[in-house]
Image: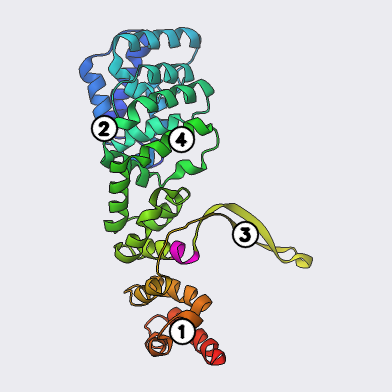
Amino acid sequence: MLTDYDLPPALEADLVALGQCLLAGTAPPTALVAACVARLDGLPAAQVVTAGARIRNALCCFCYPVTDPGKDRRLICGVLATVPMLAQVLILHRDGHVREAALNALVTVPRSPFMLAALAMRLNDWAGPVRTAAAWCAGRLFAQVAPDVAVAMGLALRAGWQDWMRWAPAQAACMDQLFARPAVRVQLVARFATACDGALAGTLRSFLRTPLLDAALPMLAAMARQAGVRATALQVLLWGQARWKTGTRREWVNKSLGLDRPVPELARRDVRQPVDRNALIAMALQDRSALVRRTALRALAQCWRDFPGLATILPALEADPSPTVRRWAGYLRPERESGL
C-alpha cells in the first residue's frame, strides 16, 4: 500500500530511467515503457494524487535544473511522436504542454482504475488547454472503459470529483456520461448492494447528488449488505431528499463568551421515488442493524398516526438491545398515548 511519500522501488527506478531518456531526446526501449505502464496499472486509484506527485518527480529526475524548458518540452514531445505508448505515462508529467500533447496522442483505453483516475484528474487540471484536451480524450475513450474498471475507480475516489472546481460543465459531463452507461450503472449498484468493506454510505451520498441511482434505492434499502448503505437509502426514500455535505460554517454557542462550533453545510436534492412508506418502515424496524431501525423510528416519529399496528410493535422496540432505539420507542409511546 502506498504512503504519501513513496512509490514501489521498481517503478521509481523505471520512471527515472525513462525520464533520462526523454531529457536526452532518445526513444526509450519499448520494454521499459511497457514495464512503467504495467506497474502504473498496479497502483491503487485512491492514491492517484500522492502517487502522481512522486511520479512527476521521478520522470523529471527529481527536479533537475531547468535551463531551457522549451527545449526539454520539444525533446519530450518529439520522443512521444515516435513512441505513442508513452502517452499513458506522460499524462502525469509536470509540464502542462507535455500533458496536453500526451492526451492528444492517447489512444489506449485505460485498463486499470489508477490509469482511469489519472485521466479523470486531467479533466480538472490547473491548465485550461489540458482540461480541453482531457475532455476530448475522455469523449473518445470513456465509452470503451470496462465497467468493472469504471466502478472500481468511482468507489476508490468516493465520487470526489463532485467537488472539483476548475472544470467547466462540459468537462464535468464526461464523468456523468461514464457512470450513466447502463453496464457501469448495473455494476455500481451491485457493488453497493454486495460490498461489505469501505465507507460505502458516504460514497453513496456523493453519487446521489444526481438521479443516477434513484431507481435502485428501494433495493438497496432492503438488500444491501452494509448497514450504512441500507440506512442511507432508507433515509433518502423516507424523507424524499438526498443530502450531502458541501463544507462547514461556524455557529455561535455563546457569542458573549466567544464560543462557537463547526456546523456542516448541506446541499439537498428532491428524490421522487414511489414507495409504500409504511411498508418500508415496517421492513426497516425488523432490520438486524440498530442504525437502520433508528432511521426508521425517526421517520415514524413524523407519521406515527398513519402507521398501522403501532401498539403491537412498541413493546418489542422498547426492549431493543440498542439504547438509542429504546429512547426513540419511548418517545413514541407518549406521542401515541396523547394522540389517543
If you read the primary sequence from the N terminus, does the residue marked by circle 1 or circle 4 appear first?
A: 4
Q: In this picture, is 176 found above or below 94? A: below
Residue 123 part of the magenta-drawn span = no
Q: Which residue is mark 3?
A: 262
The kind of residue tagged 2 is Arg
Q: CA distance from mark 2 to mark 4?
A: 21 Å
Location of residue 289 in the rendering, given as x and y in whole percent from the top left corner: 35, 72
Give the crowd class for mark 3: few <14, some 14-19, many >=20 residues within 10 Å: few
Callout 2–callout 3 Cβ contact below 8 Å:
no
Residue 8 location, quadrant = top left
Q: Which residue is mark 1?
A: 329
Instruction: Work out which residue is located at the far right of the displayed protein and give it.
Output: 256
Give the crowd class for mark 1: few <14, some 14-19, many >=20 residues within 10 Å: many
Location of residue 27 in the rendering, given as x and y in whole percent from the top left corner: 29, 10
Residue nearer the viewer, 287 or 299: 299
Q: In this picture, is 163 found above or below 314? A: above
Q: Which residue is mark 4?
A: 173
The kind of residue tagged 4 is Ala
Residue nearer the viewer, 167 or 276: 276
Q: What secondary structure is marked by label 2?
A: loop
Q: What secondary structure is marked by label 4?
A: helix
Q: Which residue is mark 2?
A: 111
Which region of the structure is painted magenta?
235-239
The kind of residue tagged 1 is Ala
For image coordinates 34% across by 60% down, the residue present is 220
If you read the primary sequence from the N terminus, does the residue marked by circle 2 or circle 1 appear first?
A: 2
